[in-house]
Amino acid sequence: MRITASSIVTNEAGELLLIERHDIHTFDVPGGGLEAGELPTEAAVRETFEETGLEVRPSHLLGIYFWPNKPDAFLTFFVRCELLGGTLRPSEETPRVGFWPTNRLPLRMLPMHRQQIRRTLAHGGERPFWTIQPITLLFKMGKPVVGRVIHPFIQWKRRRRGNPSWPIPKPWRTGAFTIIRNEAGAVLWVKRTDRDLWNLPGGGGENEEPPWETAVRETLEETGCHVRLGQLTSINSYTDEANLTFTFTAEIKSGQLTTGPESAAFAWFQPGEEPANAVSQHRERVADACDPSGSVVFRKQSSRIDPQASQTAGDTV
């Protein structure tokens, strides 16, 4: 899966920061692919500076779009960012940058990008949304031209000028877990069958599926219960690989707890009272879900399973 992050930045006049793409010369908000180990908030800040010369600070997550592109699906984060300073200037990737009134966006803008911008601008400070972006007929017609003609021609021109080719975005893996609480506030944990460890219900994504579908599917497979997702509470990037993990609150709609190939037992633990052999990264995710601010937590974690220790450098937005 390809993962990208875009920034929504406005100036004092309420105008929106836009860039012109160098390949198809349409306008969009600043953004680009995540680097291995990077958080979406970090990518939004970095890409904004690289493409526009402006320094920004992430404020909060607005929404997530899943785009079922084949062979690689795309997951795009839209992050509201505060303008700090810098000098507005174009770049090799962005021949034109500037601020536009939100009610008079440029005509040369893909309908998909226009729709995304409209929705994120209209989204307030409430919890972020997540949705699937359908592939339109216009995109199906234009994709072969961009992929087989425009991009190879741009790469050829760069090589002819002695410049390195644009790097190909690296694929990411995704995973998703759920936090299910009972009436007493205790959280459901699953005892693994392969190791003497407790972890939250969930697991890795399959077949380029959106993370919210991963959370529902994996919880069903491990517990035998159908769940309804509530809030997105945290997003974690592993420091040592390209893997992004999502944690959602959930409630059981139907079914009953049933052990199976991946689950040897179940138990309910109060937050902060998990056993010593509970996966430390998951203990952190439970604590993040209990944050009274209600913000989505962005945190870096190690992928190494160690119930006694965890790496927690990160920021909260």
Image (cartoon, grey):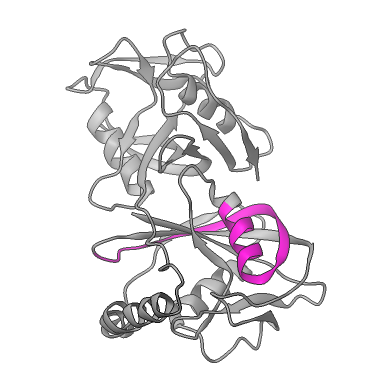
* Relative side of 73 to 123, left or right: left
Could one spot residue 186 in this view of the protein?
yes
Q: Which residues are magenta?
A: 43-70
Q: Residue at x 44, y 81 (%)?
A: 23
Query: In which quadrant is the C terminus drawn?
Result: top right
Residue 313: image x %, image y %?
Answer: 61, 32
Q: How many marks overall?
A: 0
Residue 123 visible in the current orientation: no
Closest to the observer, 229 or 234: 234
Looking at this view, is 214 or 236 the one in front?
236
Task: Tell which of 28 and 191 is nearer to you.
Answer: 28
Q: Is 255 situated left or right of 229 in this image?
A: left
Q: Examine the image and state in which quarter residue 124 appears.
A: bottom right
Q: Quadrant of the N terminus?
A: bottom left
Hey, which residue is sitting farthest bottom in the picture?
107
State whether residue 95 is above or below residue 39.
below
* Residue 69 is covered by the magenta coloring: yes
| Residue at x-position 43% and y-position 37% | 250
- Residue at the (51%, 29%) spot, across then down: 285
Residue 84, quarter of picture: bottom right
Horizontal and vertical percent position of residue 122? 62, 69
Q: Is 13 contained in the magenta span? A: no
Along the horizontal axis of the image, is 151 left or right of 148? right
Residue 45 x, y percent position in the rendering: 64, 57
Classify residue 226 by image quadrant.
Answer: top left
Could you tell me residue 136's position as x and y percent? 32, 79
Left or right relative to 50: residue 4? left
Is residue 250 shown above or below 312? below
